[in-house]
């Protein structure tokens, strides 16, 4: 048995959608769960369905860090192994479906979201969904995950009251409560709620830092309110604590008790349309803007990147032939030419505007050893394997995993034996996530198919073809880039 499919029996799911979901599941070998996603738009959508899905989607994203476009869909396909895990829980009905999504997120499984038709017959009269009782059961599944935080707050408050009653000062009361309750919260949060197996040292240091910061904020708030209101600190403390409760939970969820893979998946769920193929970057439009010099800020970041790349390369001697992948009208050429005055510099790109722009600007200039070639790197074999340096900056992240691997290999195919391969790509640091999120909200993000990558994915391919010589993180440009340097075997 390869998969199990569930579908509602009230006529909401068409046979063709069921078969399409099956085909999409089987076509993606690394998928554990696929769900049919409805569009909650238009006049024919019942208000309770539209409103309920929107609220649940926001809550789910907040608590589990993954954007699920249709949390209540009954059309799902999943592997037998995933079914065995689900059968171990005691949930039934709609809460069973919600727990399925929760489990998939906690296990960091891939969830494929496939668009299906949105069908409501007689305003969904045939549905067995009870908007009150079933909603309660669904939200119970979600909110049990903050039970740890509520219990921690109670422990902290009880210890605080006892210490305060014994005559200890505010700082001592706060500290004693935080130590006892914080120890409980960390252990339960790591092992039961968030279930992470990440670096214990990092999590512990991050958690202690968060605890101290929030304690100091809360303590100052208690002092301020108690002083000006004349109300006892015992009464004021729950008010201040409730104000920072959400902050504490969200920081733990998204920055302390979370794996890099979950961070990556959260970003790429958005950029890849939740598993639906993303719109490819319009490189012709992109190079047209570059030609008109509309990228003044990015000109600065590229200068920073060029300096860092050249600093990594300067230790390697006898560089006479340089190849850049995907550079179009290369923003690195001038810097490279200053460092390697007589080297051949060849750009391979499949954007005609980018290639034409480079050749118009540089091809006829001294030393006449530079040109751009219109070339599809993925679909064509290497035409030259004698380059001393092959590099790309911000290229390999614009493909799916299979083609990212193929593009990494292509670097080594163009390099000579013992040659240098340098690859840069975005990696999901907090800085990257914040800046990208802002740009997306402002509708200024153009690289819709960009996947922030982890070192393990890139290195798993590259180490088959070369020795890793250097690894560096470029924070200075904001949208953090990792730079890897290899020597071809």
Image (cartoon, rainbow, N blue to C red):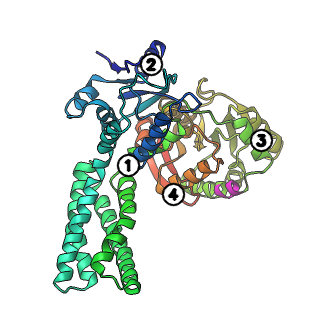
Q: Which residue is mark 2?
A: 13
Is residue 232 rendered to the left or right of residue 365? left
- Residue at 68% of width from left, 38% of height from top? 347
Distance of label 2 from label 4 (alpha carbons)? 42 Å
Q: Which residue is mark 4?
A: 431
Secondary structure beneath disc 4? Answer: helix
Q: Nearer the viewer, mark 1 or mark 3?
A: 1
Q: Nearer the viewer, residue 130 or 28?
A: 130
Q: Nearer the viewer, residue 460 or 185?
A: 185
Image: magenta residue range: 297-301
Q: Nearer the viewer, mark 3 or mark 4?
A: 4
Distance of label 1 from label 2 (alpha carbons)? 29 Å
Residue 297 versus residue 360 in the image, above or below? below
Compare marks 1 and 3 and give the one earlier in the sequence. 1
Q: Which mark is residue 63?
A: 1
Disc 1 residue crowd, few under 14, some 14–19, many 20+, Cα 10 Å: some
Distance of label 3 from label 4 (alpha carbons)? 28 Å
Disc 4 residue crowd, few under 14, some 14–19, many 20+, Cα 10 Å: some
Q: Nearer the viewer, mark 4 or mark 1?
A: 1
Is residue 323 rendered to the left or right of residue 259? right
Compare marks 4 and 1 and give the one earlier in the sequence. 1
Q: Is residue 265 visible?
A: no
Q: Nearer the viewer, mark 2 or mark 4?
A: 2
Q: Position of residue 110 (x, y in %)?
A: 39, 34
């Amino acid at each position: 048995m390869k998969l199990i499919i569930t579908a509602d029996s009230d006529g909401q799911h068409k046979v063709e959608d069921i078969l399409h979901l099956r085909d999409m599941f089987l076509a993606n070998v690394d998928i554990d769960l696929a769900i049919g996603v409805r569009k909650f738009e238009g006049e024919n959508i019942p208000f309770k369905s539209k409103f309920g899905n929107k609220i649940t989607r926001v809550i789910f994203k907040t608590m589990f860090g993954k954007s699920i476009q249709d949390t209540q869909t009954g059309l799902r396909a999943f592997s037998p192994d995933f079914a065995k895990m689900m059968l171990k829980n005691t949930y039934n009905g709609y809460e069973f479906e919600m727990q399925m999504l929760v489990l998939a997120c906690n296990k960091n499984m891939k969830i494929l979201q496939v668009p299906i038709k949105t069908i409501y017959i007689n305003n969904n009269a045939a549905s067995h969904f009870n908007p009150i009782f079933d909603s309660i059961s669904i939200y119970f599944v979600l909110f049990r995950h903050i039970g740890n935080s509520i219990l921690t707050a109670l422990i902290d408050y009880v210890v605080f009251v006892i210490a305060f009653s014994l005559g200890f000062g505010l700082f001592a009361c706060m500290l004693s409560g935080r130590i006892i309750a914080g120890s409980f919260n960390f252990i339960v949060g790591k092992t039961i709620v968030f279930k992470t197996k990440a670096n214990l040292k990092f999590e512990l240091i991050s958690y202690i830092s968060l605890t101290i910061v929030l304690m100091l904020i809360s303590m100052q708030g208690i002092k301020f309110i108690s002083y000006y209101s004349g109300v006892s600190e015992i009464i004021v403390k729950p008010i201040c604590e409730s104000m920072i409760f959400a902050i504490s939970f969200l920081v733990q969820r998204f920055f302390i008790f979370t794996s890099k893979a979950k961070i990556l998946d959260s970003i790429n769920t958005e950029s890849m349309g939740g598993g639906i193929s993303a719109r490819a970057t319009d490189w012709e439009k992109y190079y047209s803007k570059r030609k008109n010099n509309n990228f003044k800020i990015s000109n600065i970041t590229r200068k920073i990147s060029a300096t860092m790349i050249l600093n990594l390369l300067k230790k390697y001697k006898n560089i006479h032939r340089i190849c850049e992948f995907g550079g179009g009208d290369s923003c690195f050429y001038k810097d490279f030419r200053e460092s390697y005055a007589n080297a051949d510099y060849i750009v391979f790109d499949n954007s005609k505007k980018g290639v034409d722009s480079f050749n118009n600007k540089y091809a006829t200039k001294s030393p006449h050893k530079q040109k751009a070639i219109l070339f599809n790197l993925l679909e064509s074999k290497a035409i030259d394997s004698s380059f001393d340096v092959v590099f790309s900056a911000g290229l390999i992240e614009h493909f799916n995993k299979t083609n990212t691997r193929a593009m990494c290999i292509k670097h080594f195919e163009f390099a000579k034996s013992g040659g240098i391969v340098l690859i840069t790509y975005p990696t999901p640091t907090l800085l990257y996530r914040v800046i990208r999120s802002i740009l997306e909200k402002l509708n200024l993000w153009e690289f819709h198919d960009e996947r922030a990558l982890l070192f393990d994915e890139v290195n798993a391919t590259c180490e088959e073809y070369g020795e890793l010589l250097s690894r560096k993180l470029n924070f200075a440009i904001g949208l953090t880039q990792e730079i890897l340097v290899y020597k071809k075997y």
